[in-house]
Every structure is written in C-alpha cells, then in structure tokens.
Image (spheres, grey):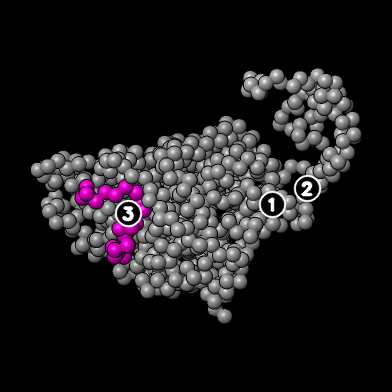
Amino acid sequence: MSSQHAKAARRFLDNNEQAQWHNRTLWMVREKRDRLAMQLPEWEELRNLASQIKMHSLSHLDYYLSRFAARAEANGALVHWAKDADEHNAIVLNILNEHKVKKLVKSKSMLTEECHLNPFLEARGIEVVESDLGERILQLMQAAPSHIVMPAIHLKRQEVGKLFEEKLHTEKDNSDPGYLTHAARLHLRNEFLTADAAMTGANFGVAETGEVVVCTNEGNADMGTSFPPLHIVSMGIEKVIPDHQALSVYTRLLARSATGQPATTYTSHYRKPRPGSGMHIVLVDNGRSRTLGNEEHLQTLKCIRCGACMNTCPVYRRSGGYAYTYFIPGPIGINLGMLRSPDRYSGNVAACSLCYSCNLVCPVRIDLADQIYRWRQQLDSLGKADRVKKIVSAGMNYLFMRPSVYNQGLRLAPSVNHLPRFMIYNPLNAWGIGREFPVFAKESFTRMWEKGKVKKPQNKDAYEQ
Amino acid sequence: MSSKDEILANIRQHIRQTYDLPGIRPRGICYPDKIAQFIEVSRSVGGEAILLQEGEDINQRIRTLYPEARTIASNLPGISVQTLNPDEVETPAQLNGTDLGIVRGEIGVAENGCVWIPQNVKEKALYFIPEYLLILLDKTKIVNNMHEAYAQLQTCAYDFGVFLSGPSKTADIEQALVVGAHGAKGLRVILV
C-alpha cells in the first residue's frame, strides 16, 4: 500500500550516503533560520503581521491588483493579464516576437516553471537561458528543480563537475565549487551581455508604487535586466501587497526563513523601465482566483516561497524533491499540487507525518499540516483512498467500537512476539518494512489495573520521579 | 470580456470573507550602537564596513584598499581615483571589465547590513557588473531596521533602487558558499 511518494523515496534512499547528506544539510539550513529568528525579539509578532497583511491583501485583491496595475502603467510599464498558463505563454511569445528576441535570459523562474514556458518558447525557436546557478545546472542537465530555493540541492559536486566539463569545457575532474561557480560566472556573463530580453519573476508587487521587488543572492535578476532593451516580469496575482510598510515586514522574514541570512544580497525595486527599454508585467491567475473561494486552502496563497517548510520537513529531507510528483515539493507543494489537480497529485498527501513543524516555521503562518490532513479526509470522496488502508481502517473501526473484542485481541497480542519473522516482516504488513516491531507486553494495562497491579502514587511528586 | 475583467470578476466572486489590515505599525529591533551593529553584520554577510577616520583622505584610503584596481568607475564628486565616468558610456556593456565601482548609498540598515541605493548613475549595471563594489555611506544615515528604512523611502523618488547586503553569492553547488556568483566578488562600505 505504498504511495507513489513512498516508492520514489525508496529510490532516493537507495543512495544512503547522499540521503543522509541531504537530510543533514537541510537541517543545517533550518538551524541557521532558527538562529536568525531568535535574534529578533519581535519574530513571532512579525509572522503574525505577515499573515494578517496577506489575508487582508488577498481579501481585497481586486482593489490592490487594479491599483498596482494602474500605478505600474503610470510608471511606464505595460501590464498584461493572463487567465491561465496558456494565455501567459502566448502573451510572452507575442512580446518576444514583437521585439524579434532570439535569446531570453531568465531568473526567478518558478511561475514560468508552473506555466511550462521554457519548452513552449524553445519549440518556437527562442533560446532560453536560466541564470540562477542551480537552475542553469539543471537546465544543462535537462532536469527539474528539486527545491524552490536550492534547486540543485540533490546533486553532488562531482555531477556538476562532469556536466561543466562537457558543456562549459572546464578542467577534467575539477569539481571544486569555487572553480565551477567561477566558470559559470564567465559563461553566464556572456549570456547576460548577448541576450535580447530578460525575464524575471517577482517576490512582491507593491500596489502603492506599482513597483516589482525581486530578491536574489547571486544578482542574476539584476545582471539579466541591466543590458537588454526588454524586461518581462511574470508575476502571480497573489504577490501584490499594499505598500512599503507591508514590504518591510516581508523583507525581514524572507531571507531569514529561507536560508538563515538577515537579508538577500540584492533586494531590487523595479519601478520604471530602463531608459530606452520596455518593461512588461504579466499578471497570472492560473487558478489563484478560484483558490480565493476555497476557505480550507485559501491560506496557500499567502506563501512567499521561502522554502522553510521543506527544510524543516522530516519527510522532505529524507526523500528529496523528486519523490513528489508536483514541481513544488514539500508541505507547500503537497497543497499547491492538490489545488492544481487532486487527480494527478494526490499521491503526495501521504508524504507527511503530521508533525506540524512546517506550521511552526512558516513566516506567513500557513496552516500547511492542517491542510494536508484535510486533503487526506477527502481522498475517499475523490476516489483516491488506498484500498488496503480502507480495509485496515474498517477493521480498526470494528475493533475500537467493541471493547470486549479489543481486549480479547490484546490478550492474544503477546503471541505475536513468538511468531517466526517471515509472518511479521512480509509484504502484506507495511508497518514491518524498514523497522522492527516493538515487543508486546505480556499483559495489557487494563488487565494489570483489574488485577490491582497498578499502584496509585502516594503523592504528587511520584509523577515527577 | 477582457482577461483583466474576467480575472477581477473571478476574484470578486470568490472572496468569501474580508480581513482588515492589522492596526499595529511594526517597530522592530533597535540597537544601542547602530554603527557597531552595521559593521558587525556586514562582516557576517561576507562584506566589510569601515569607518573613515577624521581627517583621513578618502582617495588615499581607496588606493590602499584596492591597489590592483585599474578600471575604476565612479561619478561621485570628490572621487579622484576614478578612471571611467559611468555616465559617459554609450551602452551598459561597456562597463564590463570594470575592476571597481564606487557608488553612494543613501540609507544603511543595522539589522542586516543592507545599503539602499536609488539609481543615480546612467546605467544600473554599475551596481552589479564591477568585480568589486565600494559604497560610500554617511554614517548618520544608518537606521535600525527595515521598517525605518522603508519609512524613509516614502519621500524618495527613484526609477530603480536596490538594497544591497554583502557581495554576490551562491551555495547552489552542495551548499558550499561561494562569493562572486554574478555580481561583485567583494563589497565594502566606507562610512564617512
């Protein structure tokens, strides 16, 4: 009764050393986040504010979005509206064709990943260059990101070294991260200088000023937009926030939550097009307005894409991004995937132990684990419940409703201790895979109580000993 | 119906409950010595902030800090070590190969080492393309946190602006931190 996720996770765990490294490294990022968060006495207050401002913005999204678009246009940008991925891609292609763009350099590409823009453009003869180092590595490998902030976290340096040897003609067997990053710097600098257009995502859109805010550590969005005469911003409609005061809350939370840095290296504010250049902003719905009406899952729209829920998730850390079928993995990805298509992505809801760690670190206080729990309750009505689990659940229901049968069962339980291994550890018993069963006690607590074997403590202190 | 109207109508149709903006104005952490905190956090993000001593010649100091810099781009008055006026380039690509860019920051932020730079050169590329970047910042313009910084931006007009904190960096290969991904390999702030 393994879920799709469990099967894929098994492949990840086959390389035990790499899996351990992945787990440890992401936990290290979580610890860095904790250290930075604890330096601010107002951290929890900030999280509350961040959540409340997003709830306000989302519940007045028509107002803020209109205001943002009007201000952006007054600043000289051209604003486009895309109902879905297809319309987004068509708009982008149209702009690129109008400007006779042959090469497009990209950064902050999660939304265009959602829209499958790259293959769409490539099929129409446009060269697309991802400029975030991790994303470029994956693009050269023709692979997808496995984390939204650290896209190549699943790779070892040797794999990158080998790739660069082939694609960028770096030295043989040199996999030093400093050397490889420098090689990528030279390679991508040439792309920045020769691209016909730049495309970026957006971390925030500020309604009051009509500006787009983009946060990176590498400076790839900044380099990308500094040279070509065209900048296209692709932005989800939920990214709009009211004003600078709101922005001050999010810029304090984002990098601390994402990588344990006090701020991203570059927090860039694009207000007007570069002189002599064009700036286009494509506002993308693609299901977001529908989610506004889904009270159980509305909060996913608060997400600022920091990835903290992935770094802390014990399941993500031990199964890797590729174990999930939706392109965004981890707790937020489980929920976003279900909103996209329960039919295609329901396998991911099993990838959660309901430990609630994600809820505790989320900078905008999304009820991630509660939502996953709710999706699970709906699996049966969606026709996605696991057959074996349903039978087991029905059995447990029967047992727990009948105390006498339950107690009789408990009396027999210790006999399991003496069963031959093959009867317990076999494919029919999922709970016996990858773990050892505990030894059943000879007597149940209820029996011991009945026989007077359980002594009441003499005083309160006994509890504490 | 245009896509814009359709999206906005969809939004209105789906909003179930409205929420007010929180009444509290965030204040944020304050430091007893903002300059000391700024210097410390700049180091922690891989940069460096130094105080110009009273009577010290800034051009002399820059020469000592960057003895190997050949192409130095700056449009700041009083900076005589510059070899290239960035306002005179015809294309931003001409700034490629700049060893050192010297620019002015308007606000420093003690909590995270950010320096606010509203674009005040012809091409914003100057902030990103030089091998090393040096920012001159008035030490009395350091504020405690981002709330204070953004409050000041209310009155500041800019076409493009960036909060810069430390040198360009990446950890995309095995989480090994490497400085100098695409932008400056080194970032210094001289507090004047």
Query: Quarter holding the C terminus of chain A?
Result: top right
Secondary structure category for the residue under label 3? helix
Q: Residue tagged by mark 1? A: A374
Q: What residue range appears in magenta?
A: B138-164
Q: Residue tagged by mark 2? A: A386
The crowding category of the residue bearing disc 3, from other C-alpha atoms within 10 Å (few below 14, some 14 to 19, many at least 20), is many
Q: Is residue A416 left or right of residue A97?
A: right
Q: Residue furthest bottom?
A: B1
Q: Nearer the viewer, mark 2 or mark 1?
A: 1
Rendered location of residue A3, percent (x, y): 72, 45
Residue at (73% x, 54% y) in the render: A378
Q: Earlier in the sequence, mark 2 or mark 1?
A: 1
Rendered location of residue A60, percent (x, y): 52, 67
The disc at residue B30 is none
Residue A88 colored magenta? no
Q: Nearer the viewer, mark 2 or mark 3?
A: 3
Residue at (12% x, 42% y) in the render: B54
**Residue B174 shows in the view:** no
Q: Are marks 2 and 1 in contact (CB under 8 Å)?
A: no
The lab-note entry on whether marks 2 and 3 share a chain reads: no
Residue at (55% x, 43% y) in the render: A360
As measured in the structure, the alpha-carbon distance from the residue carrying label 2 to the one carrying label 1 is 16 Å
Q: Residue furthest front?
A: A459
Q: Chain of mark 2?
A: A
Q: Is residue A41 left or right of residue A416?
A: left
Instruction: Identify residue type, mark 3.
Output: Ala
Viewer-proximal residue among B100 and A195: B100
Rendered location of residue B117, percent (x, y): 28, 56
Q: Residue tagged by mark 3? A: B149
The lab-note entry on whether marks 2 and 1 share a chain reads: yes
Query: Quarter holding the N terminus of chain A?
Result: top right
Residue at (86% x, 41% y) in the render: A401
